[in-house]
Image (cartoon, rainbow, N blue to C red):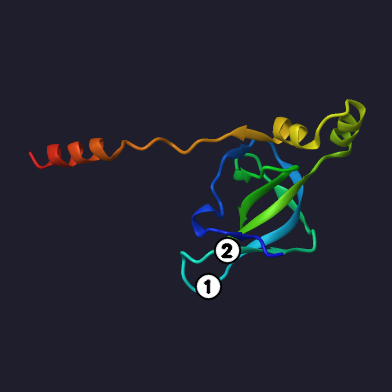
Amino acid sequence: MTRRVDARDVLDPNGCTRSAFAARVLGRYRRTGPNAWDDYELVPAKGEPLQVAAGIMIQVEDQEAHFRIRHRGKVLLAEWTPSDEQRAAIERHHLDPRAAFLDACVEDYASPPGIGLAALIAKKLSEDD
């Protein structure tokens, strides 16, 4: 079954990487047509490794330790690969891998607020004076 995503939602960051970590690529999103507004579909990948740097905007998925990231102009779906130490702590303390991923690797991210339409219009009108 093909997983389709609206072009506006293919990468909508909701987190920022707190630290560098390893991941495994699960797939990449490919546009279904020639236009920028065409939907994207998830194309499975072979699971190649990916090194993620700190300070990168990502979209955390709703399940498991999965996230979307832009890499070399493509949007990838990836899965966090915990280090041996992190894996041991997850098993020892019976932690949820997703919760461990969010705690160790992700900070909340929000888009910078805009000034709003009314303020923009007021600014434009005052510039003409």
Q: Quadrant of residue 26?
A: bottom right
Residue 109, horizontal then vertical, whole percent? 55, 35
Considering the numbered disc 2 on the image, is that residue within a helix, a strand or a loop? Answer: strand
- Identify the mark at residue 33; answer none if there is no mark: 1
Identify the residue at image location x=53%, y=52%. Answer: 9
Assign the C terminus to one quadrant of the image: top left
User: Which three-letter amino acid code belongs to the residue tagged 2?
Assistant: Tyr
User: Front-most of 41 and 113?
Assistant: 41
Assign the N terminus to one quadrant of the image: bottom right
Identify the residue at image location x=31%, y=36%. Answer: 115
- Identify the mark at residue 40; answer none if there is no mark: 2
Q: Is residue 42 above or below residue 113?
A: below
Residue 89, horizontal then vertical, whole percent? 87, 29
Q: Give the left or right position of residue 93, taking residue 40 as reference.
A: right
Q: Give the left or right position of residue 46, taking residue 91 as reference.
A: left
Disc on the earlier residue, 1 or 2: 1
Q: Is residue 94 above or below residue 8?
A: above
Q: Quadrant of residue 99?
A: top right
Considering the numbered disc 1 on the image, is that residue within a helix, a strand or a loop? Answer: loop
Q: Is residue 123 above or below residue 26?
A: above
Residue 126, horizontal then vertical, whole percent? 13, 37
In this rendering, the count of numbered labels is 2
